[in-house]
Image (spheres, rainbow, N blue to C red):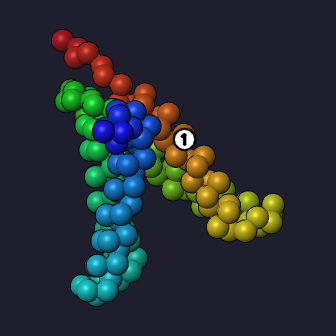
Amino acid sequence: MWIQTLLQKPVVRFCVAGSAGWLIFYALLYGLTEYFHVWYLASSMSALIVNYAVTFLLQKLWTFRDKTTHVVGRQVVLYALMVTTFYFSNAVLLYLLVEYLGLWYMYAQVLISILLTIASFLISRQLFAPEPPTH
């Protein structure tokens, strides 16, 4: 009962959907590399694409309950830009926090993950806000 109540909160659904996407990412990365002998970088890129598709759909349809179809193309492009920006931001911020502030890389990554998750939630909430069709 309390789980259903908790899952009514968009921020909780957002974290669950994101976690599901990353679980799928790591399962594909490992499976493609270890069992199908795909080069690890190709496995990673393939898994990232699947992660992107899964999280986009989960965030749109489940987290934010956006069932509109007339803006999907724009949402896909904006979501891809957001994700790409966050991937690059993660690398830059990790480098800066470790090399210039002397933080332990794991601690720095946790801080960055929290920051980017909050930013992603705020942006996604706007991105998937229902828009009336324009006729």
Quick check: 87 left or right of 96?
left
Q: Residue furthest right?
A: 101
Q: Is residue 61 visible?
A: yes
For residue 18, above or below residue 77: below
Q: Residue at x 44, y 37 (%)?
A: 11
Q: Give the answer, above or below, for where 12 lies relative to 106.
A: above
Q: Which residue type does callout 1 highlight? A: Ile
Name the quadrant containing residue 37.
Answer: bottom left
When the figure is inspected, residue 113 is found, relative to residue 27, above or below; the finding is above
What residue appears at the point 32 percent right and 71 percent down from the top-left corner? 27
Relative height, residue 36 to residue 113 (above, below):
below
- Give the residue at x 31% y 86%: 34
Residue 47 falls left or right of residue 125: left
The spot of residue 88 in percent (x, y) is: 55, 56
The answer to whether residue 105 is left or right of residue 66 is: right
Q: Position of residue 110 (x, y in %)?
A: 61, 58
**Which residue lies at the image location 49% right of the left edge and 41% below the top edge?**
120
Q: Nearer the viewer, residue 105 or 134?
A: 105
Q: Which residue is mark 1?
A: 118
Number of numbered discs overlaid on the protein picture = 1
Element carrying mark 1: helix
Residue 81 shows up from this direction: no
Crowd class of label 1 (few under 14; some 14 to 19; many from 20; radius 10 Å): few
- How far from the left and from the top, in percent, is residue 81? 43, 45
